[in-house]
Amino acid sequence: MRAMTIVLILLLAGNVFASDHLDSQYLDELPRLDIGDLFVWTGRETNSPVFLISLNPLTLGEQPVEKLLLDPHALYEFKLDTDNDNRADIAYKLSVSGNAHPQEIVLYKAIGAEAEDNTLNKGTMSVIAKGQTTIPGKEPSVVNGGGGELLFVGARQDPFFFNFAKIESPVALDLRFALGADGLPSDGTAKNTFGPTNVAAIVLEVPELRGKKFGMWATTSIGGEQVDRCGRASITAIFIPNTPPGRNPEYYTYNNPRKPGSQDPQDRPKQIYNTTRPAADRENYGDLFRKRLRQLQASNVEELVAFFLPDIQGYDPTQQMGYPNGRNLEEDAVFWTIKRINPFLAPEGTPLPYRNTQPLSDRFPYAAAPVDF
């Protein structure tokens, strides 16, 4: 583990951002609010949609279990758009109390304007489930909801991975530079890219959504103010990159502060993005995405802007499932993102895409048990 620790320290010192992990300086100081990834797929337990978000990214197994607590001042939400207007119609909102394991949790369901809002009005929202988080190192504690919902909150091995060491394309090369892929503790297979490291996971399976089509994203908020959001895989890493050190920062206009001269991490582009809502994505970020796609030598820029914005993860069980139609724990979503942006070359006979080789389960909560507990 000591060698692993050294590698991860070097990674973090090099401004590594993968998927949505550690995607802004502001969130670096708020790991309990930092959404690493969002997954949505059809769970085998009830044949219903499952949502999973990861938090507290890059937590080493040897670190204290307190690293994997949720924030009792925060609100954690899964937001669903059911009528294709890019606004939330349903939201599942999780509140937490206590600052030691196990924490008390309550899951609410909001609809309409309250689903779009980032607050918790306990008087009008339905309580779906109550229970406790799972103590790291213990068997998963599954909380059952009144409508057959399954809820888990606790430590899991980080399910995110990517492996494109043999892929040659502009976006792959760009990601290798931006994410430090060559230095990641990966052995050339589909093992966990950060691994293994742990996350705090919120996993929810919802039978009432069985067979339904929707778009979704996840958010974290404090006091009604949104702090982070996550939809598709690796959006901020690809489209809102950090200025490379010593690389003529004046040419990276997308990385200038919202307030000229401001050094406040909240005024950096990645964090501004985290506080906005998908409905305004094309207006706010269309030009930025066009610029990045041209830098990455994409040929069908307008088609790709329309695809990636708004930043909402789609789920349609009537169509073939697999990223970008849902995102399960087994597939390499970054692989498919690279392939969509521009063609790539790979040695003949390369078995792409790789699959996640973690010991995933076919039972809820599906993600692999945390390591080193």
Image: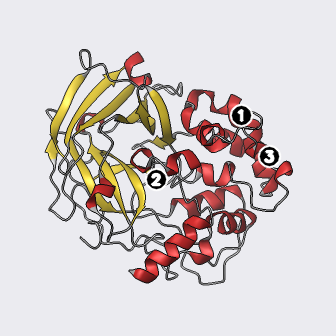
User: Mark 3 sits on what residue?
Assistant: 291
User: Mark 1 sits on what residue?
Assistant: 258
Q: Splitting the image into 4 quarters, where does residue 208 fall?
A: top left
Name the kind of residue labelled 3 in the image.
Answer: Lys
User: Mark 2 sits on what residue?
Assistant: 36
Q: Position of residue 292 (x, y in %)?
A: 76, 50
Name the N-terminal-most of marks 1 and 2: 2
* Residue 188 in sight here: yes
Q: Is 6 placed left or right of 280 in the picture?
A: left
At mark 3, the secondary structure is helix
Give me the residue at 49% from left, 40% from top: 228
Q: Is 80 placed left or right of 360 in the picture?
A: right
Name the N-terminal-most of marks 1 and 3: 1
Q: Is 173 placed left or right of 297 in the picture?
A: left
Q: Residues within 10 Å of mark 3 (few under 14, many from 20)?
A: some
User: What is the distance, in whole Å, between disc 1 and disc 2 at their CAs?
Assistant: 24 Å
